[in-house]
Image: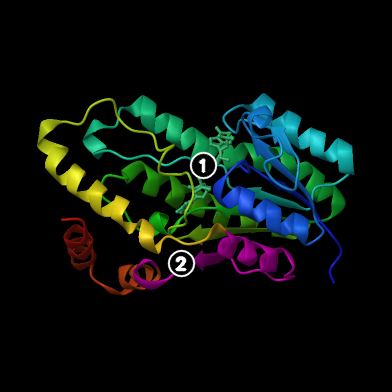
């Protein structure tokens, strides 16, 4: 059995983060989850929740310092906190897009910046950034979600090349659809333009109908448990089945317009 690790999971009040926390705590790791409002989620799981808003430098720094103060180390950071967004690209105001990118891209960056000095001092660690299958292609009416997760993928690759020399392993986990609260919390524009309404509404009804194949968050937690037990984790883990997994392969092999047509047909 590998020795237990000190694990920090952002956004662990629900969904994937909560499932990962429950599984890792059960396996004997010392787990700290985060929430913007930990007081609302007391008794939510089998591990403590501390306050963190990933859009605030001060909040991120305080939470990471708290973990280090309590345990003397930080072995694993799981950048899981994130938001969805939906709406025609044309209707997404830059302010709304900025909020999304601040949470999904700069949020993980803030947490990495706060945790890296400690990981370097202790001679290593794992940083797992939760992206999405959606980061592999531009999904209609979720432009900024795809863009944020693609950005986090590239950020992760670059950071990995910089910190491997310190023994720090940086990688992504790309989930397909899992049964969580993400749809309810998605950002949305105040109004949808008339021209975009029919296409948007149809696509959203198809998206809403895909819940039947969304999966149990614990399946993803099992993958994370294996990753942190691995001395040589891969750069990216796709945790998706069926058409979601196959689309990633098709995107690589099909001509661009052919792939685009396939996506359009799916949502029409
Ligand atoms: N579910 C899926 O199908 C799916 C697929 C691909 C990728 N993902 C990714 O998986 C991650 C987890 O999503 P989920 O599906 O588990 O959604 P969820 O149930 O809505 O959980 C999202 C978590 O993020 C936290 N959060 C949101 N904004 C935050 C902020 N500014 N600062 C700190 N925490 C914040 C929330 O915590 P509080 O509200 O308590 O602060 C919550 O715990 C996200 O990055 C998402 O993009 C999900």
Distance from mark 1 CB to nearest ligand 1 atom below 8 Å: yes
Would residue 228 be counted in the magenta stretch?
A: yes
Q: Quadrant of residue 88?
A: top left
Q: Specify whether 69 is left or right of 95.
A: right
Q: Is residue 49 visible?
A: yes
Secondary structure of the residue carrying tag 1 is loop
Reply above or below: 129 against 59.
below
At 72% from the left edge and 31% from the top edge, which residue is drawn? 61
**Residue plotted at (42% across, 30% down):** 98
Which labelled disc corresponds to residue 82? 1
Q: Earlier in the sequence, mark 2 or mark 1?
A: 1
Q: Quadrant of the N terminus?
A: bottom right
Residue 152 appears left or right of 188: right
Residue 88 drawn in magenta = no
Looking at the image, is 5 positioned above or below residue 147? below
Q: Residues within 10 Å of mark 1 (few under 14, many from 20)?
A: many
Q: Return the residue at label 2.
A: 240
SS for tag 2?
loop
Q: Which residues are magenta?
A: 218-244
* Relative horizontal placement of residue 121, taking residue 173 as reference (left or right): right
Q: Is residue 163 visible?
A: no
Q: Does the residue tagged 2 have its C-beta within 8 Å of any atom of ligand 1?
A: no
Q: Residue furthest front?
A: 43
Q: How many marks?
A: 2
Q: Position of residue 154 (x, y in %)?
A: 49, 53
Residue 241 x, y percent position in the rendering: 43, 70
Question: Which quadrant of the figure contains the C terminus?
Answer: bottom left
Label 2, label 1: how many angstroms apart (C-alpha)? 18 Å
């Amino acid at each position: 059995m590998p020795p237990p690790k000190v694990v920090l999971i952002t956004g662990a009040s629900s969904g994937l983060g909560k499932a990962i926390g429950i599984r890792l705590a059960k396996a004997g790791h010392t787990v700290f989850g985060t929430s913007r409002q930990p007081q609302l989620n007391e008794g939510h799981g089998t591990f403590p929740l501390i306050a963190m808003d990933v859009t605030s430098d001060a909040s991120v720094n305080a939470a990471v310092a708290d973990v280090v103060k309590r345990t003397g180390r930080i072995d694993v950071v799981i950048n899981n906190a994130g938001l969805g967004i939906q709406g025609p690209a044309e209707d997404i105001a830059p302010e709304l897009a900025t909020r999304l990118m601040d949470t999904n891209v700069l949020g993980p960056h803030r947490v990495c910046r706060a945790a890296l000095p400690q990981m370097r001092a202790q001679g290593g660690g794992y940083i797992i950034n939760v992206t999405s299958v959606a980061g592999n292609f531009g999904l209609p009416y979720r432009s900024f979600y795809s863009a944020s997760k693609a950005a986090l993928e590239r950020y992760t690759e670059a950071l990995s090349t910089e910190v491997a020399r310190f023994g720090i392993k940086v990688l992504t986990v790309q989930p397909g659809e899992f049964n969580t609260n993400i749809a309810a919390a998605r950002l949305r524009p105040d109004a949808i333009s008339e021209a975009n309404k029919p296409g948007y509404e149809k696509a959203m009804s198809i998206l809403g109908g895909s819940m039947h194949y969304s999966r149990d968050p614990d399946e993803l937690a099992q993958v994370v448990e294996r990753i942190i037990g691995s001395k040589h984790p891969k750069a990216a883990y796709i945790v998706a089945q069926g058409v979601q997994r196959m689309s990633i392969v098709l995107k690589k092999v099909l001509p661009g317009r052919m792939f685009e047509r396939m996506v359009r047909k799916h949502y029409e």
